[in-house]
Image: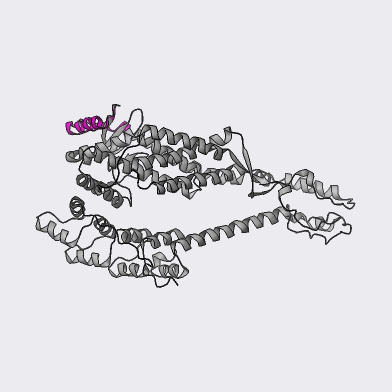
């Protein structure tokens, strides 16, 4: 238990520090920030090993209570008890006769609670790896000259001389890549006809292969399993995955692929994203919620797209190793009694009768047959009195509960979430009656108001969940925008269709222009049309008070 608590505290420090550095260097290139994120993940992976190898640097903490040596027993006088041996023997016999109770008492429940989610997450990763090997065994070798030529040109531009297997399969909706010594790029059959997109797809997947992103993906999976209880680790793993994809996008643009063409490819493949949890591989298709960010980055020519230099990577790894080693060696231990206040408690001069009902089922004879206690120097403790260990446990639980309430209050205050705002959101519709604190934070961050939710409902979109409303607000979807598209002839659009169109800046004029050109007006054609125009609008900013009349 002590080791797990120490590991949790250290992981909070390392993950929080890495996330802070990512925010500090937010103007650096995606490749540089990706290396920084994965250096933090590597430090988290090595931390348990380093903690076991290095000498422990003990730090006393109240989190683990107070150490009570056996030599500091409380002096007391036990009155003569003729039947003490009889009662002790009966108690031992009843406890020994219950093997289930004995077995349960020997289980380390804290360790068990930690191991179950960790093993589950590692099992999911193992299943994903087995699925990759199965896909490779059933795939066919690519023989198309256009795709083989695209692979050769991409390898020449990236100076990547290792052999890469180019395969095709009908078991996936979009291309993926994986592997280190013998990397694989697996294409879906629908992609074979898109020979004009071959160079962009191959360049993206080859960028993952050249950067050994598959190993980084597995690193993130293992670290998540080890520190599943730490929300900062989950955030760091998510940011690391996003940065790997952005670095691959930058590599594609560095391979002389036009940004507008590549943005159109992202929009086209966004509808065929593979399920990442059950497939341990990288794909060109954007994940949920990342399409807008990646399209905007691709079309923004002012962003730095430099690669990470090897010498700076080595310097950073050295600093991370020697800076993280002392932290890994720190060991949290309970406070020594000399450093803790002595508990004040009344101790009777004689040991009172302890009712057997606290441990085993008592009989009337057991209650009747007792031994008398001698007069106590202070008030005698009742038979069902709370022990000092129980008091420490209750106080510790109350302290932790109070700390949790304080943390939640601080977070809500920082985000501007007031009780009035929470109540107004929960009353906006049945789907929002049980919104969590995280949902409220997300909605507050992008400026979702109850009026906005009701306006979407009046536009025909009811029973929306919090995630859908946050995505719609983040891309600037408004009732006026919905009405303009309906007036242009677009009816029966889902909220996901509207969010996708708003993400790439499609307007009612674009609908009319596409119809006037003779092309079929579909959501897919409109998204491609909007991406090709390169006119991706920024979501509307959140005002200082965000228009919330209940922030009082």
Marker count (numbered): 0
**Magenta-drawn stretch contains 455:** no
- The image shows residue 127 at horizontal and vertical percentages of 41, 38
Left or right of residue 390: residue 275:
left
Residue 161 percent across, percent down from the top left: 28, 26
Query: Which residue shows up at 28% across the image and 62% down it?
Result: 477
Magenta stretch in the rendered image: 136-164
- Asked if residue 159 is positioned above or below residue 306 in the image, the reply reads above
Res 169 seen here: no
Residue 366 makes an appearance in the image? yes
Image quadrant in which the C terminus is located: bottom left
Quadrant, the N terminus: top right
> Compared to 454, does 291 lie above or below?
above
Residue 162 inside the magenta-drawn segment:
yes
State how the image is colored: one colour
As drawn, is 493 to the left or to the right of 449?
left
Above or below residue 98? Residue 51 is above
Please tell me in which quadrant of the rendered image residue 132 appears: top left
Pick whichever, 173 or 39, lies toward us.
39
Q: Nearer the viewer, residue 431 or 313?
A: 313
Give the quarter of the image for residue 386: bottom right
Residue 327 quadrant: top right
**Camera-nearest residue between 417 and 358:** 417
Q: Position of residue 22 (x, y in %)?
A: 41, 46
């Amino acid at each position: 238990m002590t080791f797990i608590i120490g590991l949790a505290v250290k992981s909070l420090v390392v993950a929080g520090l890495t996330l802070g550095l990512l925010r500090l260097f937010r103007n650096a290139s995606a490749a540089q920030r990706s290396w920084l994120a994965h250096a933090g993940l590597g430090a988290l992976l090595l931390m348990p090993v380093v903690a076991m190898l290095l000498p422990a640097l003990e730090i006393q903490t109240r989190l683990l209570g107070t150490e009570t040596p056996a030599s500091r027993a409380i002096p007391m006088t036990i009155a003569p008890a003729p039947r003490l041996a009889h009662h002790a023997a009966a108690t031992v016999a009843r406890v020994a006769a219950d093997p289930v109770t004995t077995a349960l008492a020997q289980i380390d429940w804290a360790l068990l609670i930690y191991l179950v989610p960790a093993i589950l997450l590692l099992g999911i990763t193992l299943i994903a790896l087995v699925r990759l090997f199965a896909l490779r065994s059933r795939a066919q070798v690519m023989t198309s000259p256009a795709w083989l030529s695209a692979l050769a040109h991409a390898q020449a531009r990236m100076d990547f001389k290792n052999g890469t297997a180019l395969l095709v399969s009908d078991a996936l909706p979009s291309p993926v890549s994986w592997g280190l010594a013998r990397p694989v790029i697996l294409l879906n059959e629908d992609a074979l006809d898109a020979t004009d997109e071959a160079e962009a797809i191959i360049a993206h997947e080859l960028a993952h292969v050249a950067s050994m992103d598959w190993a980084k993906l597995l690193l993130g999976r293992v670290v998540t399993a080890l520190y599943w209880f730490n929300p900062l680790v989950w955030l760091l793993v998510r940011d690391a995955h996003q940065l790997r994809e952005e670095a691959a996008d930058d590599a594609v643009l560095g391979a002389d692929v036009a940004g507008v063409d590549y943005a159109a490819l992202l929009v086209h493949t966004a509808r065929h994203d593979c399920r990442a949890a059950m497939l341990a591989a990288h794909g060109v298709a954007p994940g949920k919620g990342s399409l807008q960010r990646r399209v905007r980055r691709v079309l923004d020519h002012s962003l730095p797209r430099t690669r990470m230099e090897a010498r700076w990577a080595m310097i950073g790894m050295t600093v991370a190793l020697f800076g993280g080693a002392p932290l890994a060696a720190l060991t949290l231990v309970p406070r020594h009694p000399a450093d803790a206040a002595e508990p004040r408690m009344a101790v009777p001069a004689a040991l009172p009768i302890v009712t057997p009902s606290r441990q085993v089922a008592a009989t009337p004879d057991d209650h009747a047959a007792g031994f008398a206690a001698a007069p106590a120097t202070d008030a005698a403790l009742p038979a069902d009195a709370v022990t000092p260990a129980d008091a420490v446990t209750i106080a510790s639980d109350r302290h932790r509960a109070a700390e949790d309430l304080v943390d939640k209050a601080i977070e809500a205050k920082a985000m501007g979430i007031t009780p009035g705002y929470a109540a107004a959101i929960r009353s906006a519709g049945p789907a929002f009656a049980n919104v969590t604190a995280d949902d409220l934070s997300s909605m507050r961050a992008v400026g979702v108001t109850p009026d906005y939710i009701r306006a979407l409902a009046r536009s025909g979109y009811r029973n929306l969940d919090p995630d859908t409303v946050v995505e719609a607000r983040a891309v600037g979807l408004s009732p006026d925008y919905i009405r303009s598209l309906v007036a242009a002839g677009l009816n029966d659009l889902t909220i996901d269709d509207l969010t996708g169109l708003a993400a790439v800046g499609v307007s009612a004029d674009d609908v009319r222009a596409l119809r006037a050109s003779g092309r079929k007006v579909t959501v897919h054609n409109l998204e491609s049309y909007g991406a090709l125009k390169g006119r991706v609008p920024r979501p509307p900013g959140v005002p200082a008070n965000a228009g919330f009349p209940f922030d009082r």
